Amino acid sequence: MASTIFVIGGITFIAFCVWMLVRIAKRRKKTGWAFWGTAALAVVLYALSIGPTKWVLKRVHAPEQVELTAAVIYFPVIVAGSIGPRATRNVYDWYIRYWD
């Protein structure tokens, strides 16, 4: 039951972030390359941060609730690495193994 609540909370948080990004973009009269470049950089850094997070959680022997929270936060990355195109799965597998 708790894991379902965490997954729903994570998906809701991600949807809220996307909604806010679109709202900010529509509010500005002319959204330039700096805004979209910053948004793209934030997405890339988010996806790449799964490796160091995994490394820290493994070394610290974190409690199950902390690992579950990390799994919810990185749910989109895990799904893309698990059921995405073959190239995405290969890159994801290599990157996760690199941080082991």
Image (tube, rainbow, N blue to C red):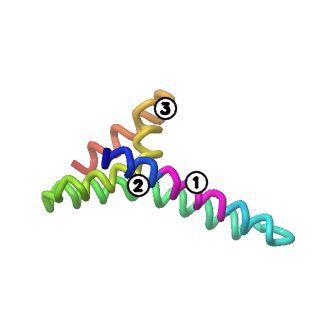
Q: Position of residue 61 (x, y in %)?
A: 13, 57
Task: Compare residues 10 and 26 and report the one nearer the observer.
Answer: 10
Which segment is the magenta one? 11-20
Q: CA distance from mark 1 to mark 2?
A: 12 Å
Residue at figure coordinates x 45%, y 53% from the top left: 10
Under circle 3, the secondary element is loop
Query: Which quarter of the figure has residue 15?
Result: bottom right
Whether residue 45 is situated above or below residue 6 in the rendered picture: below
Nearer to us: label 1 or label 2: 1
Q: Which mark is residue 73?
A: 2
Residue found at the far front of this picture: 1
Under circle 1, the secondary element is helix
Under circle 2, the secondary element is helix
Q: CA distance from mark 3 to mark 2?
A: 18 Å
Quarter that holds the N terminus: top left
Which badge, 1 or 2, is on the more N-terminal residue? 1
Q: Is residue 64 left or right of residue 48?
A: left
Residue at figure coordinates x 51%, y 29% from the top left: 85
- Residue 17 part of the magenta segment: yes
Nearer to us: label 3 or label 2: 2
Q: Are marks 3 and 2 in contact (CB under 8 Å)?
A: no
| Residue type for callout 1 | Ala
Q: Are marks 1 and 3 in contact (CB under 8 Å)?
A: no
SS assignment for the magenta stretch, majority:
helix
* Residue receiving disc 3: 84
* Residue receiving disc 1: 15
- Residue 15 part of the magenta segment: yes
Q: Position of residue 55 (x, y in %)?
A: 23, 56
Whether residue 32 is situated above or below residue 100 in the rendered picture: below
Q: Is residue 80 left or right of residue 66?
A: right
Q: How many marks?
A: 3
